[in-house]
Amino acid sequence: MQNTQVLKMQIKFAPDDTSGPAAMQETMNHYRDACDLISQHVFDRNFKFSTFYLHAVFYKKLTDKTSKMYLKAQMAQSTTRTVAAQYKALETKQHQKAWGWNNPDTKKWVKERAKDLTDLWHPIHFKRPQVDLVFNRDWSVLDNWAKLSLNTIRGRVIVTPITTHWEKYLTGTWKFGTAKVIKSGQKWFVHISVAQEVPDVPLESIQRVVGMDRGLINILTAYNDETGETEFVSGKKLLNRRRYGKQQRKHLQQKKTSAARQRLKKIGHRENGWVTNMNHQLAKALLDFYGPGTLFSIEKLNDIREALENRQRIRSTSGSAGLITRWNSFCCTKPNNTAVS
């Protein structure tokens, strides 16, 4: 049996001519506006977001060259897929939440029903200019990744990518998918999805089983059945970082100034980057410590965020549920012979 491993390459690039940035910026603005238009339509039509239905309604409007949000044929099709995927993902998240009330007699929280899309007050808003490009239709590789050809509403734009640290995914063993073009400050990036078939690990190659439990006080507890030893990783440093960030945000939110809002945004990016780096380090150290031939047994934490947020004692560690679950994806995507379940 084959499993598919999907990763995302974040490649920085620079346009080769002066007209390229303007063409890409205009294309991304049109794409964002088209996604907003389709999202509003889905919200007003009782959340009917089938891609076939949206294609029938909007394809001719978006490919009309006199339209203010004109897009080429493949880009117009990608807008419907983008909006449908966003609403489908949001619907899944909504089902993980629930409406309920506190019973004064039993002093317990009573679940009434699961939330759905009808509980939304506003449609999904696409704030950031972006565009999704289909491989070999809207974007292609030139001269063995020396150049990239990106499609815009004004024609093709040739750019020079910086593929440092991504060479192992460009050898031909990985399949390329959709590319998302975004701009951060004055820098251009293209996020490309890559996929590879990975065979199942045979049972004969498993030498040890490591059971792992995730928490707040100890962010990781690992038990090795081969040696009978238990390893603990303290989560105190991460929780202190979260508490400090919460105090900073509270102080800045009370000021209600534009400078404070800019500062809040920078603090949020810095904190998320720090936590992401810590999760990467933890996952890599875990795989290096136990080595190949290890089967990791990881507990399922469905609805963990809701369970934690409903407890008064845990509310002081707001956002800590993400610390428990986020590093799981890092563990599964590390290039190692270790099996992860």
Image: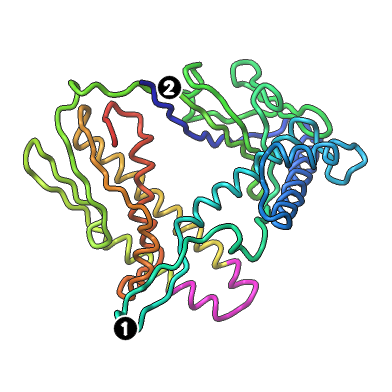
Q: Residues within 10 Å of mark 1 (few under 14, many from 20)?
A: few
Disc on res. 121: none
Residue at 77% across / 40% down in the picture? 27
x then y, percent, for residue 228: 6, 42
Of residues 137 and 50, which is closer to you in this image?
A: 50
Residue 106 shows up from this direction: yes
Residue at 14% across / 45% down in the picture? 223
Specify the quadrant that holds the N terminus.
top left
What stretch of residues is rendered in magenta? 247-262
Indicate yes or no whether the magenta region holds residue 250.
yes
The image quadrant of residue 135 is top right
Using residue 175 as the reference point, say whether residue 59 is left or right of it: right
Using residue 295 as the reference point, say whether residue 66 is left or right of it: right
Residue at 65% across / 56% down in the picture? 124
What is the total number of numbered labels drawn onto the structure image? 2
Most common SS among magenta residues: helix
Indicate whether 261 appears above or below 229. below
Q: Callout 1, which amino acid? A: Asp
Indicate whether 189 appears above or below 235. above
Give SS at disc 1: loop
x then y, percent, for residue 326: 38, 50
Q: Which of marks 1 and 2 is in front?
A: 1
Specify the quadrant that holds the C terminus.
top left
Q: Distance between the residues labelled 1 and 2?
A: 55 Å
x then y, percent, for residue 233: 21, 53
Indicate whether 85 appears above or below 334. below
Which residue is under mark 2?
197
Residue 182 shows up from this direction: no
Question: Sequence order check: which comes first, mark 1 or mark 2?
Answer: 1
Indicate whether 166 appears above or below 62. above
Disc on res. 105: 1
The image quadrant of residue 204 is top left
